[in-house]
Amino acid sequence: MRYWLMKSEPDDCSIDDLAAMPGQTVAWYGVRNYQARNFMRDQMQPGDLAFFYHSSCAEPGIAGIVEVSRRAYPDTTQFDPASRFYDPKSSPDDPRWLNVEVRFVRKVRLVALSELRQHEALANMRVLQKASRLSITPVDPAEWRYIHEHLIDAR
DNA sequence: GCCAACGTTGGC
DNA sequence: GCCAACGTTGGC
């Protein structure tokens, strides 16, 4: 069982959008980066937990907790010419892109990126590194606990 | 809107 | 296989 941080643009799908979905689940389609794909394919398992992170928005930060609810399977948008995620080089026989599915667990007060930066214990988090663009990153269990104890459940 | 970082593409 | 050009991400 592992911990993750998953970025979503709230204009696309916010934590509130996820909570409002049927079954409170969403397919994490559209990942077109091999490192992130490999995390999904090789490591992410149902039951894994993740910070749901709002990116590319006015207040970037952790907005909620989600759980992996389905292991990786072929991303259907890669075969859809009408999709912005269409990949003409991928074939159904040998799908290049996969996605997991995640389920809403809970919303948390927004823990801003600027706030995460203030904690020495979190300095190694991938999301805090300069120009960190990877949309799915592993989170160390100690960091996961620290964020809960000091930033989410505190106050 | 700017721009740094960095992944991908494609010519050679 | 190198590497320049290009596109994208995402904080600010």
Image (tube, coloured by chain):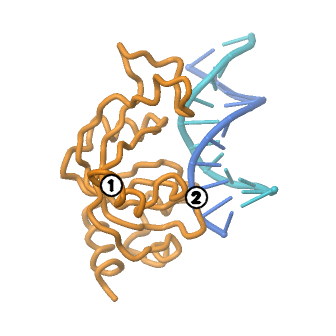
Chain colours: A orange, B cyan, C blue
- Name the residue rendered at 26%, 44% in the picture: A44
Q: Indicate the secondary structure of the residue bearing disc 2.
A: loop
- Name the residue rendered at 49%, 35% in the picture: A32
Q: Indicate the secondary structure of the residue bearing disc 1.
A: strand
The tag on residue A75 is none
Give above or below for A25 relative to A93: below
Q: Nearer the viewer, residue A31 or A127?
A: A31
Q: Nearer the viewer, residue A52 or A79?
A: A79
Residue A95, image x and y in percent? 38, 21
Q: Residue furthest bottom?
A: A155
- Name the residue rendered at 39%, 77% in the picture: A109
Give above or below for A100 relative to A85: below
Q: Nearer the viewer, residue C1 or A100?
A: A100
Reading the image, the residue beneath label 1 is: A4
The tag on residue A56 is 2
Kind of residue at badge 2: Ser
Q: Chain of mark 1?
A: A
Residue A128, image x and y in percent? 49, 63
Image quadrant in which you'd find residue A92: top left
The verdict on a common chain for dots 2 and 1 is yes
Q: Chain of mark 2?
A: A
Kind of residue at badge 1: Trp
- Name the residue rendered at 39%, 31% in the picture: A75
Mark 1, Cα crowd under 10 Å, few <14 / some 14-19 / many 20+, is: many
